[in-house]
Image (cartoon, rainbow, N blue to C red):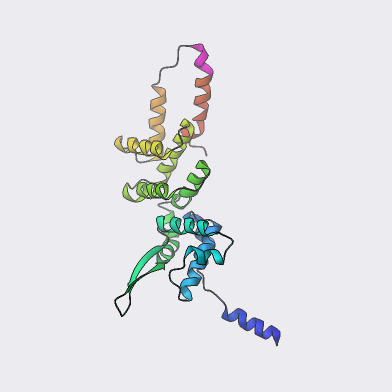
Amino acid sequence: MDKQIMLQDLLVNQLSIPIKLLTNYHKLGLNETDVMVIIQIHRFIVKGDTFPTPDDLSSCTTLNKTECSHILRKLIQRQFLSINQIENEKHQLSERYSLEPLWNKLFTVDEDEQEKPDEGNLFILFEQEFGRPLSPFEIEMINAWLDDDGIVPALIKAALREAVLMGKLNFKYIDRILRNWNKKGIKTVEEARELSRSFRGNQQPPKQTSYKKNEEKDDSLYFNWLTGED
């Protein structure tokens, strides 16, 4: 009898989650913590609470209120979560979360993968290089490069690599690289590599012997970038 009750409880207490959320989230640049918060938001929406607070989300996860706020902001900035206004019969306005942008991205990720293979992983790559989570402003800047400027993810990745190699890892410098490439009509990674080869090929070698070792060391840093190796 107890087993039957437990089985019945199990059948009743279920939440329908798209399988693609569990199999494709990494392609969108989401991590496991992001997914758990998404699942909790989905659970709240299904049960009728369409605008859970950071406190609500914190109460059913191991995350604190600040961490939940950060993830909510991240999901909104990266256009996985939207806030919609709804009006009831008394013409009163209220806000609700919608995961529809995420579901749309999940079910088109396979189609977009051929054209934008690195877009989802781009945010992860930046966070790995910077050694910290990206700020909302930085996330917005990457989205602007992708959506407003139409820069392909591979070229943004190339600019990030260039900044790393130059020892100038900041968004202003990366943005300057991309704007310079755009001014010169650079649209592909190979064109960017060719420009780098040309630029460094035109540089005059230093006359002083004391700088020779530094020059050779710098040249070796560009080996992977110029040859296209990862």
Q: Is the residue 218 above or below the residue 11 in the image? A: above
**How far from the left and from the top, in percent, is residue 101?**
40, 63
Residue 36: image quadrant is bottom right
Over which residues does the magenta segment extend? Answer: 205-213
Q: Is the residue 48 above or below the residue 198 in the image? A: below
**In the image shown, does 218 or 31 lie closer to the viewer?**
31
Residue 198: image quadrant is top left
Q: Is the residue 227 above or below the residue 47 in the image? A: above
Q: Is residue 61 left or right of residue 185?
A: right
**In the image shown, does 223 or 133 lie closer to the viewer?**
133
**How far from the left and from the top, in percent, is residue 213?**
54, 18
Asked whether residue 22 is in view, the answer is: no
Q: Is the residue 189 above or below the residue 47 in the image? A: above
Is 2 contained in the magenta span? no
Residue at x-position 31% and y-position 74%:
92
Residue at x-position 53% and y-position 74%:
15
**How far from the left and from the top, in percent, is residue 178?**
36, 39
Instruction: Count the labels in the image.
Output: 0
Furthest residue in direction bottom, as rendered: 1
* Quadrant occupied by the N terminus: bottom right
**How far from the left and from the top, in percent, is residue 165?**
48, 32
Asked whether residue 91 is in view, the answer is: yes
